[in-house]
Image (cartoon, rainbow, N blue to C red):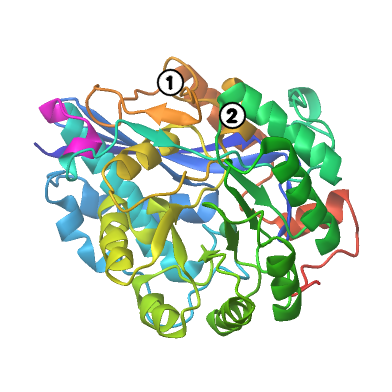
């Protein structure tokens, strides 16, 4: 079997005005859908970061992809998997995931790996999770991912989307948003995107959620490095009870040294809340120092930037060896990414936390998977018995996504620029802000 065609589709999908310490989400999130077609007309698909740079990077390796066997392609491309500068600071503290030039080849490799696995799975009639070690769970749990947000459902001009959740800029509104998400999807873990309101208001929001949902629903908060060490310790102490029982404090502050200091001071106060990260540890080269400093107790994997599904499994084994927990990170995405995340999670025993997903923030109107949106029931995605990822593309929907991309000016994610454009002309990302 040989790959005879590679089709790269840059698409735009509506995205609500969600806030984080990076700034504001644009009216459209950008994604890239890639198809690899074999000489026997089987098509493997993948979804990755969007905009011009990721599409260009994929286009650049076209000559290495065409004519190769999907069984051997990732071996042939293996020099790409580490990216540049493993062992140097590749952190995503200042760059949004998908915009870090140091992991561009890693991200490109990951996209190709998933498409090859889907193609192989569809050729041999087996689900992807069963090709990469076999499923250890048939259902993968995801967490609710509430954000503070402005009014609006995403989209622009004549393409405005329904605002399901309204404005959410207070602790009370956040609780309402979470309850609405839980009612709709059945989530049983909650990951709060913080770093937006004053820390005391975010403490209040987490306490209110605990009151409303009870002690059996794990709570996490991720302010994306918006806090100083002192503020992180203060919040960690204030939320010691609320973040216990399967919760965690994610990237309260920036850098492994600062994270280690927060950990040391919380432990000295008898608070064992684990610190999690998806920005201070983003490559294998970051792990020795993170372990040495006891800077993080949970690493958030993401096959999109860790180099694919098998690299996530390697990461899982390394985490297990060093007694570090494993959770999963997400960016705005559609169903192809969601199913890829579910497949790798299904075949990764060490993954013990419900995975992050932005999926509830996207709408049916933008989904490119045939048959519409992937179902999340009781907070879980069920691994289907269909071959590959279990998804085919809806080519009409894909064409609409391409038209949206062509029509609108967004070519890379820039949350700071969006914040200045819509909310505050003077706004700058300041780390730490509080
Ligand atoms: Mg994070």
Query: Of the residues tagged 2 and 1, which is closer to the observer?
Result: 1
Is residue 233 rendered to the left or right of residue 343? right
Is residue 121 rendered to the left or right of residue 193? left
Which residue appears at 73% of the width and 50% of the height? Answer: 206
Which residue appears at 81% of the width and 72% of the height? Answer: 434
Range of magenta residues: 123-130
Q: Which mark is residue 395?
A: 1
The image position of residue 184, as x and y in percent, is 62, 22
The image position of residue 327, as x and y in percent, is 44, 53
Q: Secondary structure at mark 2?
A: helix
Decide which of 113, 35 is in the foreground and name it. 113
Specify whether residue 392 is painted magenta: no
Is residue 99 rendered to the left or right of residue 153? left
Which residue appears at 57% of the width and 82% of the height? Answer: 264
First in residue order: circle 2 vs circle 1: 1
**Label 2 CB, ligand 1: below 8 Å?**
no
Q: Tell me the quarter of the picture where residue 386 sits.
A: top left
* Ligand 1 positioned in quadrant: bottom right
**SS assignment for the magenta stretch, majority:** helix
The image position of residue 395, as x and y in percent, is 43, 20
Image height of 405 relative to 247, above or below? above
**Label 1 CB, ligand 1: below 8 Å?**
no
Q: Is residue 431 visible to us here?
A: no
Q: Secondary structure at mark 1?
A: helix
- Which quadrant, please, contains the N terminus? top left
Q: CA distance from mark 2 to mark 1?
A: 12 Å
């Amino acid at each position: 079997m040989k790959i005879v065609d590679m089709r790269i589709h840059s698409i735009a999908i509506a995205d609500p005005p969600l806030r984080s310490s990076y700034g504001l989400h644009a009216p459209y999130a950008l994604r890239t859908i890639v198809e690899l077609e074999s000489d026997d007309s089987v098509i493997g698909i993948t979804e990755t970061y969007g905009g011009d740079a990721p599409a260009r990077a994929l286009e650049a390796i076209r000559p290495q992809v065409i004519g190769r066997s999907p069984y051997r392609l990732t071996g042939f491309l293996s020099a790409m998997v580490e990216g540049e500068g493993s062992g140097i600071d590749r952190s995503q503290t200042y760059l949004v995931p998908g915009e870090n030039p140091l992991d561009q080849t890693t991200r490109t490799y990951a996209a190709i790996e998933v498409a090859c696995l889907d193609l192989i799975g569809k050729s041999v009639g087996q689900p992807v999770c069963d090709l990469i070690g076999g499923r250890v769970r048939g259902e993968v749990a995801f967490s609710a991912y509430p954000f503070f947000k402005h009014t609006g459902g995403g989209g622009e001009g004549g393409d405005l989307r329904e605002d399901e959740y309204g404005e959410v800029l207070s602790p009370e509104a956040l609780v309402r948003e979470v309850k609405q998400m839980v009612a709709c999807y059945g989530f049983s873990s909650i990951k709060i995107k913080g770093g937006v309101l004053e820390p005391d208001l975010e403490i209040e929001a987490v306490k209110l959620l605990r009151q409303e949902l009870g002690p059996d629903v794990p709570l996490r908060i991720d302010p994306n490095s918006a806090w100083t060490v002192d503020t992180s310790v203060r919040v960690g102490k204030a939320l010691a009870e609320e973040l216990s029982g399967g919760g965690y404090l994610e990237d309260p502050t920036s850098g492994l040294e600062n994270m280690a200091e927060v950990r040391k001071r919380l432990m000295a106060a008898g608070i064992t809340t684990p610190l999690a990260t998806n920005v201070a540890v983003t490559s294998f080269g970051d792990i020795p120092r993170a372990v040495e400093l006891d800077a993080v107790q949970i690493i958030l994997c993401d096959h999109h930037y860790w180099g694919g599904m098998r690299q996530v499994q390697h990461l899982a084994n390394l985490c297990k060896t060093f007694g570090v927990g494993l959770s999963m990170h997400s960016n705005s995405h559609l169903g192809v990414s969601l199913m890829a995340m579910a497949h790798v999670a299904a075949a990764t025993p060490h993954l013990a936390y419900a995975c992050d997903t932005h999926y509830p923030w996207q709408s049916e109107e933008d989904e490119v998977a045939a048959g519409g949106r992937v179902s999340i029931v009781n907070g879980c995605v069920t691994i289907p018995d269909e071959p590959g990822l279990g998804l085919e593309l809806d080519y009409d929907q894909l064409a609409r996504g391409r038209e949206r991309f062509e029509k609108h000016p967004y070519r890379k994610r820039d949350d700071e620029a969006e914040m200045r454009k819509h909310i505050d002309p003077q706004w700058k990302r300041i780390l730490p802000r509080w």
